[in-house]
Image: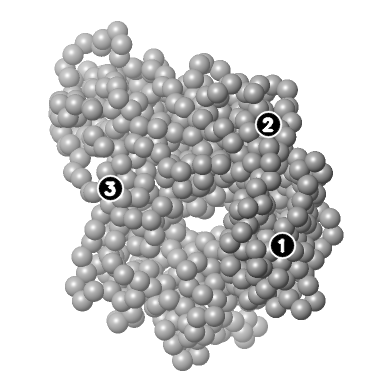
Amino acid sequence: MISRLSALAAVFLGLALAAEEVTITVDAARNRGPVRELVFGQNIECGDSRGVFSLPADAPTPRPFEVTWGQGYWDAVNNRPDPAVVEIMKQFPYGALRYPGGCLAHNFRWKESVGPLENRGSHIWTFGLDEYLAVCAALKCEPQIIVTDYGLDAAEIPQDAADLVEYLNMPAEPKYPWAMKRAANGHKEPYGVKYFEIGNESYHGNHANKPFRRFTEQEYARYFNATVAAMKKVDPSIKTGYILEGVESPWSPVVAKECAKLADFAIVHSYYPQIDALGPEPAFKAAMAGGPQFDHMLEEFRKIIRLGGRELPIGLTEFNVRSIAPGPNAWRYSFLAGMQNAETWCKLIQPEENILMANYWSLLNAMYGVVVTLPGAKVPPAGKSVEYKAASRFFRTLKSFTGAELVGCAVAGEPKCEAAAAPGVLAAHGDKLVAEGGQTVDVPIEKYELSRFKPFENNLRVSGSPEKRDLTVEIRDFGKEAYPVFAFARRPASIPAGMAWNAAVSFEARFVPAPDSTGSATLGFGFMDARGWDATRCAAAVYGVNTAREWTTFSHPLQMLGDSERLALLVRFQHMNGKLSGKLEFRNIEITARPAGHFPAYPGVSAYATKSADGKKLFVMVFNRSYDQTISVKIKLDHFKAAKVSSEELYQENVAAVKDFDPTRKQEAVTGDALSLRLPPHSMTALEFE
């Protein structure tokens, strides 16, 4: 256990620099550009959730949580931005607000959300497009709007998106009829919305909506180019972004090449790392080791973006740790999540990152919300109260200790920390990057376990040959979501126990629906650590088999853990609508594996510095990224004479804690140009020099 005494020790030590101290040098005269508010973005979920998450596609109306109360931002009784929530939000970084909320854009038909309530798609839809923009005005933040990808027929979307731009940005004159409608709806002046995302994660389709739709990468590129051309014909000044999937996805290079001409930025989402199945120490180390590996991932995305012949910035429009486990103590609310995401924001504002915008998912209410004002999803309580989660504490401190201009900040002599491999995170040790290597090893399928299909045998008839590496599933009136395992493969003997390894699966597949089939589904291929999803969170999915009428080649990689001994192969029956019948076939199933390599041990200390617009205040944010070491640091100030310093030290013994807490605050006089302090393990310390 980490001693609480280390956390309560005095922050400032009027001591000489010890030999083991880390040195942080801040050069106040080295101006590195402005702190861009657009990078401190947030997300809001306020669209039609039917068929996307838990609400059935055939539900009579959307949930009022989103479309009446605006996730808590909207006072539906008085028809205004909720003044209490607006005041709460002033405590947080808030440069932009993204709407209508991730996958809810699949159902976004903006014309149903404007005008008199009685003319909207549902009488409960009191929070629509104009109300969202009223919230942005109250919060003094930049609007970001997602154009639908599946809410209308693809042929209708370009004109609909052009009408949207006209409604938002054109003067209320007869030649702009949608702008005239905006004025009639109560907003005469143009809104001047600049940033538009063309779809949201369109590569995974529209969930359980009917009919199921999913663009191929080529179809997405056609949709993007037609839609953006129509939008920019109305207002050439707008900025539009295309969607990338993963760095190893076949989607990304096609989209980067074919959408580059009309694009202004490339959209990346990151929920990283996956820590639901980990305990406090391995979760913390995975998050810290994942930081440098995430930097590497962003550089790989930049290489893909350059395939289009342009150096476009990245819009990281969703980011957080990956934590989807239910319950009030989920990692997404935790001290650890707050520390990781606060440092992510500090990194993303650096000019070399070329990040146009970054939107945290998500601040207020809903599944990920770390500020809770609505305890349920129906109506707000008579008297609102607010609950802050531990993660939110970091963001409040970040807001208070970030200036207007970036300045030089360098760390020297920091210790290095090691970490074992975790889902999606390579082991961190040594002093150099070791790329995935070794001879590719073919992994034979160990055996077919057709017995796993027995619960479904009345609807699924299975056949296949391990020697021929094929599988056929004859489907008759099947309507359940299911993920039956059909085979296993073992870790190759050539990859030593304890070493992470990369598996890759490739196959050909097709699905031929029966003429009398009345259902639809997302059919795919999955593979995972054989101990199961709940135990390891180590899995990958291959989508799109349901659209392959001819033999089509698919492939996908997955990093296995150091203690992964077996790989399970499964068939995915997802987003089931009605009763599905047909023949699902796989052939030439190949599995290869190789050592995953490792990253260098990660730095134990990181620091970032900004100053106020008038240059009279200097802010330094310091992270102790070691799980169990107290670290001494010396902060040297160049070109800045400080008279006093105020600090907030954020530390909790348990990194999984989700309850709000108070920082340790201190004020001291400063003499000379340096200051020594001790950083508790796994902590963030914010300093303001005057």
Do we see residue 684 in this rendering? yes
At mark 1, the secondary structure is: strand
The answer to whether the residue labelled 3 contacts the one labelled 2, judged by CB atoms less than 8 Å apart, is no
Q: Which residue is mark 1?
A: 461
Residue 129 in percent (x, y) is at 48, 74
Tag nearer the camera, 2 or 1 = 1
Per the rendering, the mark at residue 593 is: 2
Q: Quadrant of residue 576?
A: bottom right
Taking the image as shown, residue 121 lies to the left or right of residue 453, namely left
Identify the amino acid type marked 2. Answer: Ala
Per the rendering, the mark at residue 594 is: none
Residue 362 in percent (x, y) is at 41, 56
Residue at 37% over, 68% down: 71
Query: Which badge, 2 or 1, comes first in the chain's sequence?
Result: 1
At mark 3, the secondary structure is: loop
Residue 539 in percent (x, y) is at 57, 45
Residue at 19% over, 26% down: 3
Q: Please identify the residue farthest to the right as the structure is shown.
A: 550
Residue at 82% over, 44% down: 468
Viewer-closest of 599 and 265: 599
Query: Which badge, 3 or 1, comes first in the chain's sequence?
Result: 1
The answer to whether the residue labelled 3 contacts the one labelled 1, judged by CB atoms less than 8 Å apart, is no
Q: Residues within 10 Å of mark 3 (few under 14, many from 20)?
A: many
Q: Residues within 10 Å of mark 2 (few under 14, many from 20)?
A: many
